[in-house]
Image (spheres, rainbow, N blue to C red):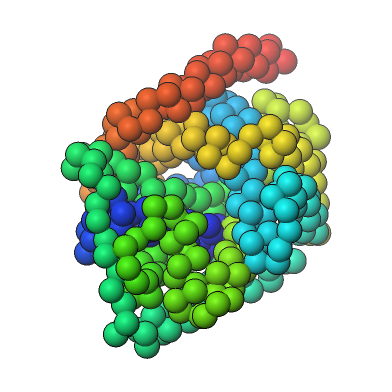
Amino acid sequence: MVVSQVVGVGIFLTPATMMRTVGSLEAALAVWFVMGLLSAAGALTYAELSTRFPKAGGAYVFLREAFGSRTAFIHGWMTMLVVDPGVTAALGIGLAQYAIVAFGGSSDLVAPTALAAIVFFGVLAVMGVNVNAHVMRWTAAAKLTIVAVLVVTAIARAGSSDLRVEAIGVPPAQAVAISLIAAFFAFGGWWEFGRMAEDVAAPRRTMPRALVGGIVLVTAIYAFASIAYMLGSTGPMPATDEAFVSQVGANLFGAAGGRLLAAMVVVAVSGSLAATLLGAPRLYVAMARDGLFPARLARVNEKRGSVPASTLVQVTLASMLVVLGTFNEILGYFVPCAVFFLGLSASAILFLPRPHGDRDIFQTPLYPLPIVFFLGLIVVLLALFAIGQPKQTALGAIVVALGIPVAWFVTAREKRR
């Protein structure tokens, strides 16, 4: 699920952005390494918190336990109204764009295709955990196969590669900001596995293996993909990521390579969309159980392990965003909010008393070094977002701020009951 959640459209677009920004493959690999370390440190923290609180909801539960119901509600407000539907809509649009490239069709079909994809994978989520596990296992295997084919083919053709990478000429600080933002987008989503803790057998064993192992695998995938793109390209690097992907496909697989690589993107995004629609609604279940969201959202189909009402909410909101916005517009304003609450939820481990001697709880090794390292890089990322994307960061902050008075009203009403 971690690999399916994380490895989506970013594997095909982010390496090009990164190499164009920092000017070399070596620098791009260094960025992947740093982001992999950041994610692994956060994953260790999330693994411990997930085994201490093996309930549906993930970050919401951690925030509630450490900082109270109001902070947790604001996170849930932001996640349900902005992040989850935004991610779902963006994945749907990305899948649709590449499906049209791969199989043909007019650009007017992007929105209808995205809506169909979101509804389809929403239905799969309602069918339950087992069905989705097969889909995610298949797509994760397909992604690994895709990377292997790319790397082997690129190495075989390496002698004809003469890709000329030139940095885009921005100041070093801005180049670092752009590359780290791109890398964070590519790694985004690993923390969503924390929402599934209630559905996981043997959390103490499974959560750290899935989170850390998944991130190590993802880091390797992105590094090898970057190398394959470098070896499989010729001439000056194109100005856009889409053109770069088409160039790599044509060079590696012949005239039809562009469509073949587009089909690979469809497979990759399908797994991410399935994982998002399965895991994200667990947050609404947790908040409904606490009386902060309507009680209907707390209903769980125990036999299938599905949450139909909560899934319907996410599908509906995501579909509205598909109709109203473009891929970049949808992505642009929610990432800083997601980063902020990711850091805040992970910091819960510093405020909660740590149990000792409980064999059911995973203990983060070298504590507190991983969480200190993780929070330090989160602060750096937030500063880079504020400098590099001030409008989007401000808009996200406004959305979060709107949830503050609602949180006071809802939590006060719940206390009076």
**In the image: residue 168, left or right of residue 266:** left
Q: Is residue 271 visible?
A: no
In this rendered view, identify the residue nearer to me: 310 or 392: 392
Residue 128 in view = yes
- What is the quadrant of residue 127 in the picture? bottom right
Of residues 163 and 315, the one nearer the viewer is 163
Quarter of the image for the C terminus: give it.
Answer: top right
Q: Does 112 sit above or below residue 405? A: below
- The answer to whether 73 is drawn above or below residue 117 in the figure is above
At x 49%, y 22%, the residue is: 395
Determine the image quadrant of residue 386: top left
Quadrant the N terminus occupies: bottom right
Q: Position of residue 346 (x, y in %)?
A: 40, 41
Q: Residue 31's x, y, as percent?
A: 27, 55
Q: Nearer the viewer, residue 5 or 199?
A: 5
Q: At 38% from the left edge and 38% from the top edge, which residue is drawn?
A: 343
Where is residue 24 drawn, in percent x and y?
23, 61
Q: Looking at the picture, tell me which residue is in the foreground, 61 or 401.
A: 401
In the displayed structure image, the side of residue 82 where residue 304 appears, left or right: right
Residue at (57% x, 11% y) in the render: 405
In the image, residue 369 sits, relative to residue 144, either above or below, namely: above
Q: Who's the residue at 26% across and 65% down the image? A: 164
